[in-house]
Image (cartoon, rainbow, N blue to C red):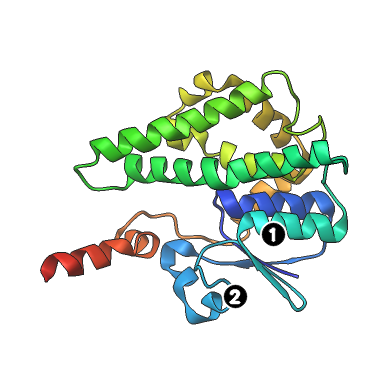
Amino acid sequence: MKFYYHPSPNPSKVALFLEESGLDYQMVPVDTARGEQHGAAYRAINPNGKTPALVDGDAVVFDSTAILLYLAVKHGKFLPENTPEVRSRMYSWLMFIATGIGPFSGQAVHFRHFAPEPKAYALHRYDFEARRHWRILDEHLATRTFMVNEEYTIVDMALWGWARALPFMFGEQGWGDFPHVKRFLDRVNARPAAQRAEALKDAHTFKTEMDQEYLDAMYPHNADRAATAAV
């Protein structure tokens, strides 16, 4: 099984599942800061040109949530109690993270750290929406150990992937705004599998310098914007 990985929130979710489950896999680094996700060979695996992706024999899966569901169902691991009441909560929170937490958090990071001026309106919008989504999670975790039915599941793995990035989104003071998320993160971080998943970033020398190559690889819309402006 080949796991196409970059040390960012979405691949980290899958890394945690793989380490928790003890499945045999080969980590294949995809250095997104160098634009490797846009190459033809990788696009044949993931036409969306994002990480992660998984090749499991004849099965090819992309999108982190799809991979979590694929692995959990195939191996019967880290799924909550199989009742309509509990599974409905699993699907709801899993998709809340996939369609709310991920996109709004990613845009909040982009406009805070990388977007050119003027950006005040966009930064306010995405910062507001990201905080609103995280506040919902923080309130949910106020009286719970884990996200669904007090069972450690793929929903917690999905949340762990993004929760690690909260200081980059909002600054270190963000933990004061989301104390229950911080408590959850500390609990998962203490798991040996989480520590192994975190250590994957050191298995390859990924580019970290945020230079022009990085910006061009991560934000290809800038080249399109420049070409449009030149017309």
Image quarter for residue 97?
Answer: top right
Residue 225 position by quadrant:
bottom left
> Which image quarter is the C terminus in?
bottom left
Badge 1, how many Cα within 10 Å: few under 14, some, many 20+? many
Cα distance, mark 2 to mark 1?
13 Å
Q: Nearer the viewer, residue 198 or 158?
A: 158
Residue 191 in the image: above or below residue 20 = above
Q: Residue at x 57, y 41 (%)?
A: 162
Is 125 left, or right, of 225 in this rendering? right
Label 1 sits on a secondary structure element that is helix
Of 81 and 50, which appears nearest the observer? 81
Residue 94: % across, % down: 66, 44
Residue 152 visible? The answer is no
Q: Quadrant of the N terminus?
A: bottom right
Q: Which residue is mark 1?
A: 67
Kindly indicate the quadrant of the structure image that contains residue 71.
bottom right
Above/below status of 173 relative to 76: above
Counting residues from the N terminus, which is met first, the one under dot 2 or under dot 1?
2
Label 2 Cα crowd, 10 Å radius (few <14 / some 14-19 / many 20+): some
Counting from the top left corner in percent of width and height, residue 63 is at 60, 60
- The image shows residue 131, relative to residue 111, as above or below, that is above
Q: Is residue 228 left or right of residue 113?
A: left
Question: Quick one: SS at disc 2?
Answer: loop
Q: Amino acid at mark 2?
A: Ile
Q: Looking at this view, is 37 or 135 the one in front?
A: 135
Res 45 label: 2
Q: Which mark is residue 102?
A: none
Q: Give x and y (percent) for residue 14.
A: 68, 54
Residue type marked 1? Ile
Q: Position of residue 223 (x, y in %)?
A: 26, 66
Q: Residue at x 76, y 34 (%)?
A: 148
